[in-house]
Amino acid sequence: MMNRLIHTTIATCLLVWPSMALQVAGQTDTPSMDVLTEEEWSEVDASVQKSLAWLAKQQQRDGSFPTMPQGQPGVTALCTLAYLAHGHTPGEGTYGKLLENSVSYIVSCQKPNGLVAQVAPFGMEISRNVSRTVGGTATYNHGISSLALSEVYASTQHTSSEEIKSIIEKSIEATLQMQNWPKARKIDQGGWRYLDLLRTSGEPVDSNLSNTVWQMLFLRSAKNAGFDVEQKPIDDAVEFIRNCFHPEYRTFVLMPSHMDHRTRGMAGAGIISLALAGKHNSNEAQTAGNWILENTFLEYNKVEPFGQIGWLDDRYHYGVFNCTQASYQLGGRHWRQFFPPMVGVILANQRPDGSWDAESHSSDRKFGNAYTTALMVLSLGAPNQLLPIFQR
């Protein structure tokens, strides 16, 4: 418990990010660490240490963490963030070499066009004439991996941070290029979608929340870290995210439409995005926070029909990650009511070796359990406040 308090104090004092003035103005109830007892915090710390040790054994010779090619280097980036979230940095301490290798692997995946993705078009321009097999994951890998590199750059004074500076600059250019692609609907402006061109006879949709949140987090992280990112692309992304709030459903949905695309992951993603804009107390954030409390994670790794919602696209572990970060940003009763029961379920379902099960959703099961384990470690590390992007 004492180490957690020290970590929180240090993380808060390291840098005053440009976003902090906005965020402080909207804060009214700082998340309390008293939500768990000292003994319970010790159990959390023991769980995390066991998980990080397990992940270390999974790292491949090239620095990656195991998953299918379409999940790289996004899964490796999430594993890297998991270590950073618990105070580990490249080149230092027990996992210093591991992190140097994972960062090197992520960097090696950048294409000449700036995309950071193993499976992606290779040319100098970002081609959209690709299949869904390529286009469906490339933007996710790019956003998550670029965010990880930016957080490494912001969190360490190690020489590797300078080496990745040019990589991040190329990533920014690629992200902004994709944001500015023509959109058929005005309501989709400011957002991102899959890389491949939309081919449908129905309503054209050129942006969705699941892609947009990762790109927005990256741009915000890069701006906070001192990179030249204009405020307008971030503001435009926030506006799109607000358009994804559905008043009837009382939460954020995958895309602005009349279709029911509610998931716990998107609820958390919307809240996090607004929090970064200093809108902790906005009606959208508070209402979606209430919705999360009504739709719990008490049944581990369950994504089948739940209550009145089909939730065909709900991912359990991704949802836990987003909703934990969101609840911490909201603070107050949202944090008090969400975090303790979530911790109980997650710790009770950790495997003896320190990992967690692969995702039960058929689309994400193939990414393996280094992916889900990294998400759980990141969730348990939310109170540490050691990742600048998630600092409150």
Image (tube, grey):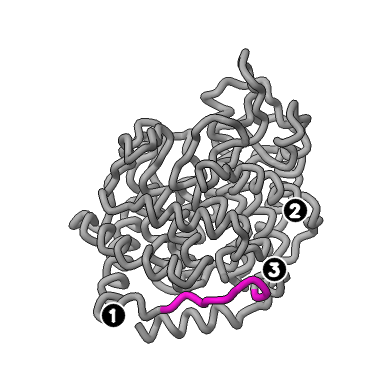
Q: Which of 383 and 293 is in front in this view?
A: 293
Reading the image, the residue beneath label 2 is: 235
Q: Which mark is residue 19?
A: 3
Which comes sooner in the sequence, label 1 or label 3? 3
Residue 60 visible at all: no
Task: Identify the image quadrant of residue 175.
Answer: top right
Which residue sits at x=28%, y=80%?
37
Q: What stretch is highlighted in magenta?
A: 24-32
- Where residue 95 sits in the image (x, y, percent)? 41, 66
Q: Nearer the viewer, residue 370 or 263?
A: 263
**Does 239 sit left or right of 297 as displayed?**
right
Which comes sooner in the sequence, label 1 or label 2? 1
- Where residue 39 sits in the image (x, y, percent)? 24, 80
Vertically, is 389 above or below 211? below
> Residue extending furthest front?
248
What type is the residue that disc 1 sits on? Thr
- Per the image, label 1 sits on a secondary structure element best described as loop
> Residue extending furthest top?
201
Task: Identify the image quadrant of residue 350.
Answer: bottom left
> Residue extending furthest left?
352
Q: Nearer the viewer, residue 113 or 163?
A: 113
Q: Answer few, some or many: residues within 10 Å of disc 1's Cα (few below 14, many 20 plus, some between 14 and 19).
A: few
Vertically, is 92 above or below 112? below
What type is the residue that disc 2 sits on? Asp
**Does 337 sit left or right of 353 as displayed?**
right
Which residue sits at x=39%, y=38%?
367
User: Is the Cβ of the residue at disc 1 closer than 8 Å to that at disc 3?
Assistant: no
